[in-house]
Image: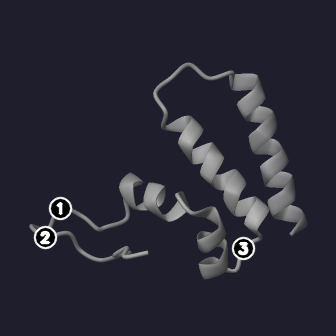
Amino acid sequence: MGLLVDGPKPGGSGTTNDGNTARRFFSDPALSADITGLDKTLSRRFAIILQTISCGFAVNAAALDDYAMDTARLFVSL
């Protein structure tokens, strides 16, 4: 995926672990699942949650809560 993970940024401004890294990682949930060994459905649900909370638009909070809780239950069951 061409990602630098947990490395220092040039100039000492922290590490490469940031929102852009997460967005790139989850932009291909199937590949992310293969890399991490996660279930592909779980990886896709994580990607959707990340996209939703960072989209900048009004979101149906109750629907997102339900979706996130269903995702958490799936995570625990797996």
Distance from Cα at disc 2 to Cα at disc 1: 7 Å
**Where residue 45 appears, x then y in whole percent?**
71, 52
Please state, as top left, top right, bottom left or bottom right, where the C terminus lies in the image. bottom right
Q: Position of residue 10 (x, y in %)?
A: 13, 70
With 37 as the anchor, is 53 left or right in this view? left
Q: Residue at x 56, y 46 (%)?
A: 50
2 displayed left or right of 41: left
User: Where is mark 2, residue-wise?
Assistant: 10
Assess whether mark 1 and mark 2 are in contact (beta carbons under 8 angstroms): yes
Looking at the image, which residue is at 72% across and 73% down? Answer: 38
Q: Amino acid at mark 3?
A: Leu
Q: Which residue is mark 1?
A: 13
Q: Nearer the viewer, mark 1 or mark 3?
A: 3
Toward which corner of the image does residue 41 lie, by quadrant?
bottom right
Whole-percent x, y for residue 52 in the image: 58, 37
Residue farthest left in this picture: 11
- Location of the N terminus (image quadrant): bottom left
Check if mark 2's residue and mark 3's residue have beta carbons within 8 Å: no
| In this rendering, position of residue 72 left or right of residue 43 | right
Q: Gap in Å between the C-alphas at discs 1 and 3?
A: 31 Å
Dot 2 falls on a residue whose secondary structure is loop
The amino acid at mark 1 is Ser
The quadrant in which residue 65 appears is top right
Q: Which residue is mark 3?
A: 38
Label 2 packing within 10 angstroms: few (<14), some (14-19), many (20+): few
Q: Residue at x 85, y 63 (%)?
A: 76
Q: Secondary structure at mark 3?
A: loop
The disc at residue 1 is: none
Q: Is 28 placed left or right of 60 in the picture? A: left
User: Callout 1: 10 Å neighbours few (<14), some, many (20+)?
Assistant: few
Mark 2 and mark 3 lie on one chain; the one further toward the N terminus is 2
